[in-house]
């Protein structure tokens, strides 16, 4: 990372959105449903599955939470209409968990019923630790009305192994990610290697119980270790897939995994609330700032 890239990254929050938009473009599939589904179709053509997420979180008004809920239900209908290989992922605070547990249950179960009606899958995303217990309650509630629902598990939390043991079984569908929220050392691993080791432990625990797991990581070292374990233990391909965020550079690794017969699912975010999400992604990969400006000047 150059000093220039670092300066651009740190300055984005203070710059007008029109200036920041070129930097956001690699990470966001557009602002509209049609833009996002167009990107998903192109991913499908390349052999990738997808899951789609409307950007936003911490909604405080009931009207807004229910509007987002309706948008997710409409998304399922469009995916079904076009026969797209795409599921949906939902953040609980985007549909009312900041308002109340009951509001979130009302809206998430509505989305789950739509998924059931159309035979699709629903992933419940995980946010920061103050919402973990409530999110698992949402998951359990949805599972009472539809089995094809999964939840995300964060590898940096100490509690995650016990959560998998509590929730797990051959009907358990998880998405293991490292975790992106800043959490205290009293509840979460802080060291990168410790998080990798716990990620592997969690993956093994899910497989041991016959559950399905999405390995959501861009960490090439961790991917190598997962593959070594998968091949050594002959883990069935129907029990896992690799997952990655839309637009994050991985040096052709995803195509390589796909060509070797592993299912790869791309997490595709879109929507008008693209700015804060893009700044977070850019902070994780500041080199993209230099690439974007270089291409702008070439044009």
Image (cartoon, rainbow, N blue to C red):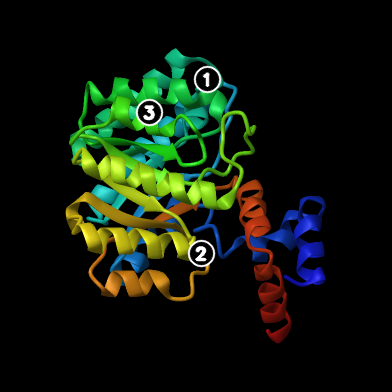
Q: Nearer the viewer, residue 3 or 112?
A: 3
Which element is circle 3 on? helix
Residue located beneath label 3 in the image: 163
Along the polypeptide, which appears first: circle 2 or circle 1? 1
Q: Residue at x 56, y 24 (%)?
A: 130
Residue 70's x, y, as percent? 40, 32
The residue shown at (43%, 51%) is 33
**Residue 278 location (% of width, % of height):** 62, 54
Determine whether, in the image, residue 236 is placed left or right of residue 178.
left
Above or below, 231 relative to 66 = below
Mark 3 or 2, nearer chain start: 3
Residue 116 position by quadrant? top left
> Can you tell which of label 3 and label 2 is closer to the viewer?
3
Task: Where is residue 271? Give x, y as percent.
Answer: 53, 48
Question: Total label count?
Answer: 3
Q: Are marks 3 and 2 in contact (CB under 8 Å)?
A: no
**Residue 88 figure quarter:** top left
Q: Which numbered marker is on residue 247?
A: 2
- Element under label 1? helix
Label 2 to label 1: alpha-carbon separation: 32 Å
Q: Residues within 10 Å of mark 3 (few under 14, many from 20)?
A: some
> Mark on residue 46?
none
Q: CA distance from mark 3 to mark 2?
A: 30 Å
Q: In the figure, 129 relative to 28: above or below?
A: above
Q: Which residue is mark 1?
A: 62
Which of 202 and 176 lies nearest the eye of the viewer? 202
Quarter of the picture holding the N terminus: bottom right
Residue 88 appearing in the image: no
Q: Position of residue 110 (x, y in %)?
A: 32, 25
Crowdedness of circle 2 by 10 Å Cα count: few (<14), some, many (20+)? some
Secondary structure of the residue carrying numbered label 2: loop
Q: 131 and 247: which one is in front? A: 131
């Amino acid at each position: 990372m150059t000093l220039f890239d670092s300066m651009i990254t740190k300055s984005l929050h203070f710059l007008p959105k029109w200036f920041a938009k070129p930097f956001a473009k690699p990470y966001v599939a557009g602002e509209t449903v049609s833009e996002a589904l167009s990107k998903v179709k192109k991913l499908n053509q390349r052999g990738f599955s997808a899951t789609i997420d409307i950007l936003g979180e911490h909604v405080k008004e009931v009207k807004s939470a229910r509007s987002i809920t309706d948008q997710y239900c409409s998304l399922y209908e469009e995916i079904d209409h076009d026969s797209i290989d795409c599921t949906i992922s939902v953040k609980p605070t985007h549909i009312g968990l900041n308002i109340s547990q009951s509001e979130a249950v009302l809206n998430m179960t509505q989305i789950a019923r739509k998924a059931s009606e159309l035979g699709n899958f629903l992933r419940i995303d995980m946010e920061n630790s103050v919402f973990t217990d409530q999110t698992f309650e949402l998951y359990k509630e949805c599972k009472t009305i539809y089995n094809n629902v999964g939840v995300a598990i964060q590898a940096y939390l100490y509690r995650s192994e016990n959560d998998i043991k509590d929730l797990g079984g051959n009907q358990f569908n998880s998405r293991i990610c490292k975790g992106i929220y800043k959490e205290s050392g009293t509840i979460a691993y802080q060291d990168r290697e410790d998080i990798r080791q716990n990620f592997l432990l969690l993956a093994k625990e899910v497989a041991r119980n016959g559950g399905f797991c999405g390995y959501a990581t861009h960490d090439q070292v961790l991917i190598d270790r997962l593959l070594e374990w998968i091949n050594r233990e002959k883990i069935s391909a129907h029990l896992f897939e690799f997952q990655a965020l839309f637009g994050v550079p991985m040096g052709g690794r995803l195509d390589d995994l796909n060509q070797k017969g592993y299912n790869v699912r791309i997490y595709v975010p879109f929507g008008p609330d693209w700015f804060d999400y893009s700044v977070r992604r850019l902070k994780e990969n500041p080199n993209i700032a230099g690439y974007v400006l270089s291409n702008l000047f070439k044009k």
